[in-house]
Image: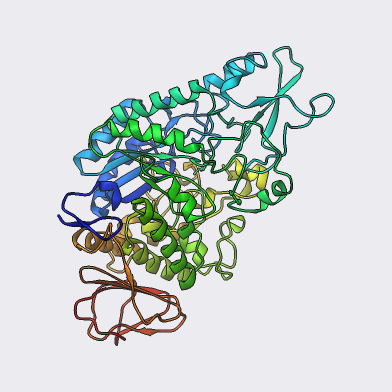
Amino acid sequence: MQVTGATGSEPVHRRAAWWRDAVVYQVYIRSFADGNGDGIGDIAGLRTRLRYLADLGVDAIWVNPWYRSPMVDGGYDVADYRAIDELFGDLDDADALIADCHALGIRVIADIVPNHTSAMHRWFQDALRAAPGSPERARYWFRRGRGLEGELPPNDWRSRFGGSAWTRVNDPDGRPGEWYLHLFDAQQPDLNWENSEVRLEFEAILRFWLDRGIDGLRIDVAHGLIKDPSLPDLGERAASEELQAPPNTIDHPHWDRDELAGIYRRWRQIADEYPGDRMFVAEAWVTSSDRLARYLDDGLLHTAFNFHFLTCKWSAQEFRGAIDTTLNSHSLVGAPPTWVLANHDEPRYVTRMGRSDRIRQAEEHAQSPGVDLALGTRRARAAALLLLALPGSAYVYQGEELGLWDVEPGVGQIQDPAFARTGRTRDGCRIPLPWSGDRAPFAFSQPPVAADDVWLPQPAAWSDLTVSAQLTSQHSMLALYRAALELRRQHPALGDGTLDWCEPHRPGVLEFTRAPGFRCVVNLSGDPIELPAGANVLLSSVAVAGGLLPPDAAAWLEAQRQSPV
Ligand code: NOJ
Ligand code: CA
């Protein structure tokens, strides 16, 4: 296979590492498929549906945290990094899943959570029992409070889930004592990465999973591990931090600090000791694409989520800006970009793009009356073709291939810990998948359960969006994804490489070619546009008639015979 290097200059006559152009399917395990009939997705359920993923045509799955956890934050509060939570199965199930996936040619990416543990982790429990200044407390960020009695938090840092990032503990004698840092929920104490025991422990945890055959690891909050040890106040920035999603991370005391490179250089060395192109993908919310690329510098991580693209409005100008800055910054470090439209923390794409205000507003999550689902769905179809045509690797969040939308549960049913502190919930994009049948729970659980017994309720309207319903329709979102993924596998222009924007540039239109012989056109202009004369349409998000591409639509064309418009 001839592939083009990330800079696009030199053809590389060897098989490029799989992660350079992989399509990775994100499995939010609680909501994918339930294999033991308790209404919560698990590894057994996932194993029964692997054929679906192979037929969809994905190269890898990323499974959200499955470790032993009190599940305060959907498993991002880990109590034991070497055990599977009994909700999801056990280590034998994980081994069997890895083996099943490999037999089907699917790689497996696990999720590692190094910024914080659960408060129920043995280390934190030991720290609570130990004295101030002890080695047990040194693994976390314990500090005396300010004020005469230490009654005020040590500084003004804010939790991403709202409120102060500090919680006070009682001393073993029951009197109010030190405070500890948590950039997320109070049940998620931040680890102190200045501490060598912490570093060694995570290196051992990486090896534990790499030894089991995991192909990659997604690094949770990869931009947060290092704190300025002097713990300076944020001052004026503290107030804006709660309102800004994501915050400005430039020169910040706990986000995106240069010293992170030391951790990831070591992690890369460990991954490189293993055969078979093991990889990392960083979850790093940073202020610019250049800053993101620093995580991918020589000897550091392989890939990082591209949130700049995820946060684009429905605007050709914004998309083009994000694509250009991403391609430029990544080519300088020789790393493939990733493209992401949705994940388990953001409103689904149909919902976001169907909003009348057309902007990303996590705070306006879910079923707001302003959502035009037909519009959102048209745009989601077009965006899928854009995503899968761009150079690099792409992530598909489960249910996006079905065109699902956000459904916010009633207040009594909300599970997300962020809700209590912020009034916002991410549950809307975490609703269990509909597999078949015309009523909830749409065969989510095997053996079957009552609709009310599924951990978050599914809407009746998803009866048209079940996997089995969509498999019978050529026009479904699922059919579009399957066709796009198949073409992407076969077409030599797609995957890793570069793109060339078409000239002259038409306002509101994204139009690029990729060699050999591929052209992608996305119409965000609000009016129908002409496709190049004689263009052979390989795939389109809507029917193309009379050589016109309607608004909110995309087409993949064979570029050989194209003539300029
Ligand atoms: C990012 C994860 O995607 C999110 O779900 C989680 O709440 C935070 N990190 C904290 O671990
Ligand atoms: Ca289950």
Point out the image quarter for the C terminus: bottom left
On screen, residue 184 above or below 546: above
Please state the horizontal and vertical placement of residue 529, each as a whole percent of the image. Answer: 38, 84
Asked if residue 28 can be seen in this view, the reply is: yes
Q: Position of residue 252 (x, y in %)?
A: 61, 44
**Residue at coordinates 63% horizontally, 18% vertically from top-left?**
128
Q: Is residue 276 left or right of residue 185?
A: left
Task: Report the coloring of the rendering.
Answer: rainbow
Task: Between residue 294 and residue 473, name the one nearer to us.
Answer: 294
Which residue is at a point 53% across and 48% down the rendered structure image? 427
Quarter of the figure that contains the N terminus: bottom left
Q: How many marks?
A: 0
Residue closer to the observer: 221 or 85: 221
Give the residue at the far top of this rendering. 173
User: Residue 315: in sight, yes or no?
Assistant: no
Q: In this rendering, is residue 463 above or below 145? A: below
Measuring from the top left, give residue 231's x and y in whole percent.
Answer: 66, 34
Task: State the residue lying farthest toward the right.
Answer: 148
Residue found 22% across the figure and 60% down from its top: 486
Ligand 2's quadrant is top left
